[in-house]
Amino acid sequence: MDTNFKKIKKLPVLIISIFVFIYVTISISINTQTIPVNSIQDIKVYPGGGIVGIKMYVQGVLVAGFSDVLGVDGKIYKPAESTDIKPRR
């Protein structure tokens, strides 16, 4: 009779383990999706140089330069042309 009691005592753990296994299996099978991914080659960056501190006193915004931006559609955009910001000469 002692062995039957040990088996009954382990039964709830077995039932919970089965339910957890079924739940995990179902949620993994429901949530899997195939997503196309474009990978690029790894880039290694080696930091170097010295530390420089610069304090600048300006009124407003200091524009260091203008550059064009390549959009996702492949076109080149010039956001600075549509503003009143002009480089200081």
Image (spheres, helix red, strand yellow):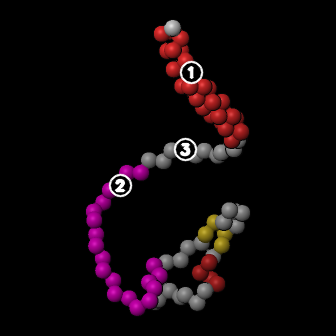
Q: Residue at x 55, y 87 (%)?
A: 85
| Position of 46 relative to 21 (above/below) | below
Q: Earlier in the sequence, mark 2 or mark 1?
A: 1
Q: Position of residue 2 (x, y in %)?
A: 48, 10
Mark identifier at residue 47:
2
SS at badge 2: loop
Residue placed at 60% from the left, 86% from the top?
Answer: 83
Name the residue at 28% across, 65% down.
51
Residue beneath label 1, please? 11
In the foreground, 46 or 19: 19
The numbered dot on residue 33 is: none
Please report the bounds of the magenta region as a residue range: 45-64
Q: Secondary structure at mark 3?
A: loop
46 left or right, relative to 2:
left
Left or right of 79? Residue 61 is left
Q: Are marks 3 and 1 in contact (CB under 8 Å)?
A: no
